[in-house]
Image: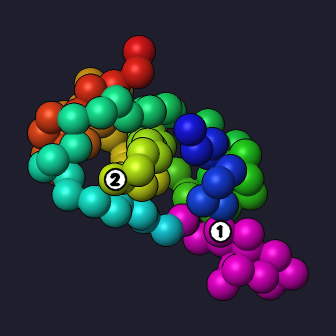
Amino acid sequence: MPTYQTNDSKGWCGDPSRGAALGRATIQEGDPTAFTGKLTLRKVRLDSGGYDPNGTYFGWGEPLYWCSCETDEHYIDFILRAPNRITAKRLVREDYPNARFYN
């Protein structure tokens, strides 16, 4: 199972000496409508400056959620914003209608 650090941007344009990365890449491999597995959906804590635990800058706004799963057919790792977990699940299901979630 991937961890939140797996898809870390490692600094601006991949170079930590150039400063913090702005956001992170979205990875959605495989057919989303065929996905029937379980997804990890976790709230990402941001510090007072809007940085995640990896030092990537997201700024402030609605809460940040990380969604991921890695199987032989699918590699999923992306960030979304939603006011709460229920809404985050609904937004994920727009792309992954058959997905289930851990917890």
Q: Which of marks 1 and 2 is in front?
A: 2
Image position of 78 with respect to 102: above or below: below
**Left or right: 46 as drawn, with respect to 71:** right
User: Could you tell me what secondary structure mostly forms the magenta stretch?
Assistant: loop
Bounds of the magenta segment: 9-24
Residue ID at (70%, 80%)? 14
Residue ID at (22%, 35%)? 36
Q: Nearer the viewer, residue 98 or 48?
A: 98
Quadrant housing residue 20:
bottom right
Residue ID at (54%, 65%)? 24
Disc sitting over residue 73 in the figure: 2
Quadrant housing residue 17:
bottom right
Q: Position of residue 21 (x, y in %)?
A: 66, 71
Q: Nearer the viewer, residue 62 or 11?
A: 11
What amino acid does circle 1 point to? Ser
Residue 76 in sight from this viewpoint = no
Task: List the residue tagged with mark 1.
Answer: 9
What amino acid does circle 2 point to? Glu
Q: Position of residue 13 (x, y in %)?
A: 66, 84
